[in-house]
Amino acid sequence: MTTTTATTVYDWGALAQKAIAGDVLTKEEALSVMQADERELLAIMAAAYQVRHHYYGNKVKLNLIINAKSGLCPEDCGYCSQSRISEAPVTKYPLLEKEVLVDGARKAMEMQVGTYCIVASGRGPTPREVDQVVAAVAEIKSTMPMKICACLGILSDEQAERLKAAGVDRYNHNLNTSEDHYSHITSTHTYHDRIDTVEMAKQAGMSPCSGVIIGMGETDEQLVQVAFALRELDADSIPVNFLNPIPGTPLANLSNLNPRRCLKALALFRFVCPSKEIRASGGREVNLRSMQVMALYAANSVFVGDYLTTEGQEASADYGMIADLGFEIERCAL
């Protein structure tokens, strides 16, 4: 099946083969994914699956978040219930003690999780917080075959090096949106602050994890821009989040997503970043709804369990979704 724009006819299978061959899609081709007639959704997802299967077969990576520090954040991110401008009634607490973080990793192992994500609110970690995370990671890595991803905000060179030395495999710092849309979402730090943090994590030897939040008022063109920015950044793991409008946040009344747009977005990231881990992440339950299972034709990774201040679905539902597709959970290989 093909789709026609004013000037070009696109063959989704041909675009898939182009991505598999390692050729970079043009921005016009990428934009065509988002702007295609929705009657072509199945053809787009079938093409995205060709690329996904080439690199990952039918394996699905499981990730789990522990909200290691909640609220108390001085930043003003409009989507976040933990920011200083949020009026959402979230639980606030300082960084969890080492024993709690280690216990969370044990629970993640029981849930067949390959990557355990330690996430803390705030602009960046204090020296004491880095000490706590380093101690927890060292114990986890010495006793469990599990990858560790840390998400602690903006880092210094020394902090990045300490986290790597302790055994942190991956560092997450999302771009969230395109450079020219960024000031509409946050004012207390810049898009380039985030780019610099991801680059610092890479220089320290940690695998870069950086993704997006779709549905924050961005245009199709801006979504394409951030997809190519993540390709240029060479992020190994790309969490694709879908805005879950939380009452009490500035974006509480923004609701412009539907399952078809979410699936197209996942296909877009698979075509633009074909060999990377694409994760169907926060907000998938409320935005993809009954079409969640289709996400795995483009994405090869999901979060199980709850997110930071919002609930996910029962892990058993995710296991069932994976089994119903005939897919299999990827075991952690360190």
Image (spheres, helix red, strand yellow):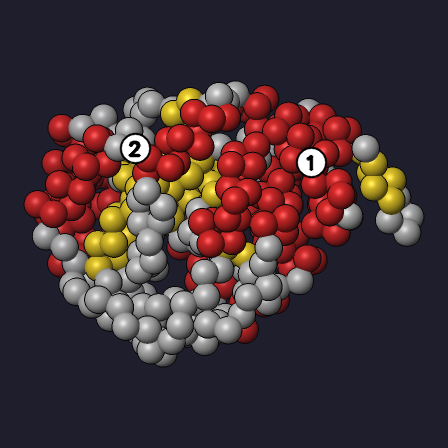
Q: Quadrant of residue 272?
A: top right
Farthest residue, direction right? 7
Residue that carries the numbered disc 1 in the rendered image? 42
Depth check: 106 or 306 in front? 306
Q: Is residue 63 visible?
A: no
Q: In the rendering, at what x and y percent does residue 153 appear?
A: 33, 58
Name the residue at 30% across, 32% down. 113
The C terminus sits in image quarter: top left
Residue that carries the numbered disc 2 in the rendered image? 113
Circle 1 — which element? helix
Q: Nearer the viewer, mark 2 or mark 1?
A: 1
Q: Is residue 48 visible?
A: yes
In the visual, does 247 lie left or right of 120? right
Q: Residues within 10 Å of mark 2 (few under 14, many from 20)?
A: many
Name the residue at 86% across, 49% down. 5
Q: Are marks 2 and 1 in contact (CB under 8 Å)?
A: no
The N terminus sits in image quarter: top right
Q: Residues within 10 Å of mark 1 (few under 14, many from 20)?
A: some
In the visual, does 150 lie left or right of 194? left
Q: In the rendering, at what x and y percent does residue 250 appear?
A: 45, 76
Q: Amino acid at mark 2?
A: Val
